[in-house]
Image: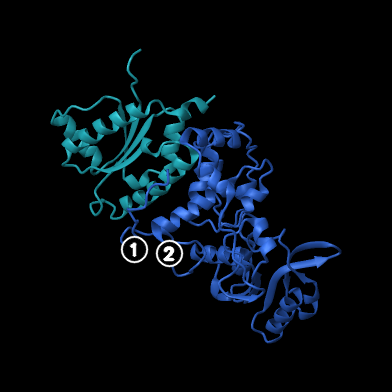
């Protein structure tokens, strides 16, 4: 049987993480191709519903990437994300969805190597977790 | 107890401390919310566990109290409020839904039986004027059962529970904290129309997440649910989590801002708290 190839969705903020992803590409850092990137203007735009929607629509893992605390282009956008995701993690756990399928990381525009590292590590983690059980729920 | 409430209400009205008393009126065997402006009517003032939180009911998509305050901003209203009702009023005031300065709360403590019936953790208001304060229910069997389950078992459990949902929106309509005029639970993107049961777990997840930090633990949602989905179980856990994460309890302090509306500098997350799984 072929190895499980997870589908991973990443929300990248326009100002840091998306540029970080770009830098990773330009610098030719290798990272697994399982990731699909959606660019958002700020990680604060990512509503927890997006993450749940992604998981119930067939994603095996969701990455939320934003600027480091203090570097947000909109001052406090990532503060909000951090708080929301803390609550989201709890709810996912109680609902029986492994909270490790969702991860919030800060990646700046200068951290191309870190972007590759985060994606590689997260992909490995999702591979070890296996396919998302929520997928089957969909009729 | 009810005599004391009527007596105090009469005193407030006659001393012009308030212009009106908002409470439940009993007439011909029926109970309904009523605004008492005349002291002679107060013999019909009553309390009931079945009609809790009538102060936040929404006949026209807007809280009845906000509607009244919108029309008559200067009227001082006295309210007979249980613990949950007071918390609801405070939490709504925090979100600019009503003006707490114009409201005078007559706090009443619930009895032990009433607390048990509601699985209430705090069956008393901040300053109970009437009734004896009893401790609430601290251990909830449903909560412990859920926590003892493994992740796949939890998913199986919720899959079963949520598949019963008939999308009646009862939990949302009865919730004192759900006051948005445009509700995400009605948006096509998140909850497709014509799907029954609604998307698992999206439909109820929206409510759990949105109400997480402001849930006052009144349990109205669970009582309203026609198919008995244990909504309160998760809300209880979330109330506990919000307390652990942000040291915040909904409906306690009108001055304290809500965690999701503040920055990390104003209200930090306590990192050391484990994620509960």
Hue used for the chain lettered A: cyan
- The residue located at (34%, 20%) in the rendering is A4
Give the chain letter at badge 1: B
Residue B101, x across and y down, in percent: 54, 75
Task: Identify the secondary structure beneath mark 2.
Answer: loop
Give whichever of discs 2 and 1 has the lower sequence position. 2
Residue at the image point whose x is 72% and y is 58% from the top: B50
The answer to whether the residues at label 2 and label 1 have Cβ atoms under 8 Å apart is yes
Q: Residue B70: which disc? A: none
In the figure, the blue chain has which letter? Answer: B
Mark-to-mark CA distance, 2 and 1: 9 Å
Disc 2 crowd, CA 10 A, few/some/many (<14, 14-19, 20+):
some
- Which residue ends up furthest to the right in the rendered image? B28
Residue B266 is tagged as 1
Which residue has dot 2 on it? B257
Quarter occupied by residue B73:
bottom right
């Amino acid at each position: 049987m072929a190895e499980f190839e997870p589908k991973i969705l990443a929300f990248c903020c326009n100002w840091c993480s998306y540029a970080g992803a770009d830098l990773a590409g330009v610098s030719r850092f290798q990272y697994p191709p399982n990731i699909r990137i959606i660019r958002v203007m700020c990680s604060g735009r990512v509503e927890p519903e997006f993450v749940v929607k992604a998981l119930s629509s067939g994603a095996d893992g969701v990455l939320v990437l934003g600027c480091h605390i203090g570097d947000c282009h909109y001052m406090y956008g990532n503060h909000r994300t951090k708080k929301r995701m803390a609550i989201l993690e709890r709810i996912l756990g109680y609902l029986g969805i492994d909270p490790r399928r969702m991860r919030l990381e800060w990646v700046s525009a200068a951290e191309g190597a870190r972007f590759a590292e985060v994606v590689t590590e997260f992909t490995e983690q999702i591979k070890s977790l296996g396919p998302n059980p929520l997928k089957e729920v969909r009729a | 107890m009810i005599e004391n409430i009527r007596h105090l209400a009469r005193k407030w009205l006659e001393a012009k401390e308030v212009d009106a008393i908002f409470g439940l009126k009993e007439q011909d065997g029926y109970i309904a919310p009523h605004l008492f402006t005349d002291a002679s009517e107060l013999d019909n003032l009553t309390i009931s566990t079945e009609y809790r939180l009538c102060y936040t009911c929404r006949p026209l998509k807007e809280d009845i109290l906000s509607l009244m305050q919108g029309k008559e901003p200067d009227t001082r209203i006295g309210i007979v409020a249980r613990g949950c009702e007071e918390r609801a009023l405070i939490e709504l005031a925090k979100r600019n839904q009503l003006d707490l300065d114009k409201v005078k709360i007559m706090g009443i403590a619930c009895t032990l039986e009433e607390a048990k019936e509601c699985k209430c953790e705090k069956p008393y208001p901040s300053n109970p004027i009437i009734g004896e304060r009893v401790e609430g229910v601290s251990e909830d069997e449903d909560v412990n059962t859920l926590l003892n389950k493994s992740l796949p078992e939890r998913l199986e459990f919720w899959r079963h529970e949520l598949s019963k949902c008939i999308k009646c929106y009862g939990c949302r309509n009865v919730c004192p904290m759900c006051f948005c005029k445009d509700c995400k639970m009605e948006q096509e993107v998140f909850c497709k129309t014509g799907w029954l049961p609604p998307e698992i777990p999206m439909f109820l997840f929206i409510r759990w997440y949105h109400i997480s930090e402001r849930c006052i633990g009144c349990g109205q949602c669970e009582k309203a649910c026609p198919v008995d989905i244990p909504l309160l179980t998760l809300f209880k856990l979330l109330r506990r989590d919000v307390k652990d994460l942000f040291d915040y309890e909904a409906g306690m302090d009108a001055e304290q801002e809500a965690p999701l509306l503040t920055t990390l500098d104003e209200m930090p997350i306590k990192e050391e708290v484990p994620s509960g799984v």
